Image (tube, grey):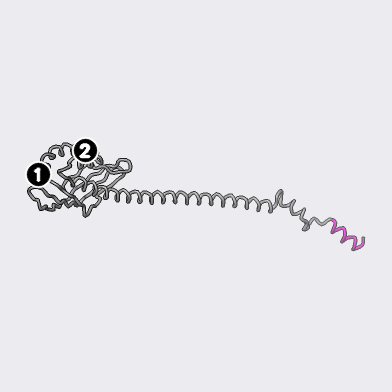
Amino acid sequence: MAADDTRDEDLWNDDTPDDDPVTRRAEQGPGGRRASSAHEGSGRGRAGRLLGAAVVAALLVACGVLGYLVWQDHREDELRRTAADDASRLVVQLASYDHTDVDANLDAVTAEATPEFAERYREVSDGLRELLSSGEGTSVGTVPHSAVESVDPESAVVLVFLDQEISNVTVPEGRVDTSRMIVTLVRDGNRWLLDSAELA
């Protein structure tokens, strides 16, 4: 046999795999490396989307909590402001009267008081009515300062500094009495009602 024929036979019987793409896919199995890479990429994409959704959810929760805390602080500040303002106004109303129209003072005070305080104030006013009329008593109250001691959505305690300018037949020129009062308010809807006012 000739040498050229031997080389041709060796090439024909050579089992060494060539670089044919079909052969590579057969060796790699179904899907090959490309299918595996696509699967891995799909898994990473799904994990990324889940992580992104979790981050968004956490941010929404954090924003909600922060918003509630801000609202709560604003709510408490508003309650403190209105409690101080209303306590001052109600004490001025309580401390101001005119012997010529005692009922006007009585009606003004009881209109913004709890039923319990209104009842007590009517009893006191009935006893003082004749004394105020005969003594020609008048009073004008002012509140130079007030401070909230405690407050919550249901009630408040306010320390009020009261100046009361009083005149009657005994002191016709008048005098100024200064006192401190502890005022308790009760929340009724969107307003404060006077529940007690005691000298401190």
Along the line of sight, the residue nearer the viewer: 56 or 82: 82
Type of residue at label 1? Gly
User: Is 11 included in the stretch rendered in magenta?
Assistant: yes
User: In the picture provided, is 178 more to the left or to the right than 37?
Assistant: left
Dominant secondary structure, magenta: helix
Residue of label 2: 118
User: Is 103 included in the stretch rendered in magenta?
Assistant: no
Range covered by the magenta-colored residues? 1-12
Residue farthest right in this picture: 1
User: In the picture provided, is 126 more to the left or to the right than 20?
Assistant: left
Along the line of sight, the residue nearer the viewer: 173 or 110: 173
Check contact, mark 1 vs mark 2: CB within 8 A.
no
Residue of label 1: 135
Q: CA distance from mark 1 to mark 2?
A: 24 Å
Disc 2 crowd rating (10 Å Cα; few below 14, some 14-19, many 20+) is many
Type of residue at label 2? Ala
Dot 1 lies on which element? helix
User: In the picture provided, is 120 more to the left or to the right than 78?
Assistant: left
Residue farthest front in this picture: 100
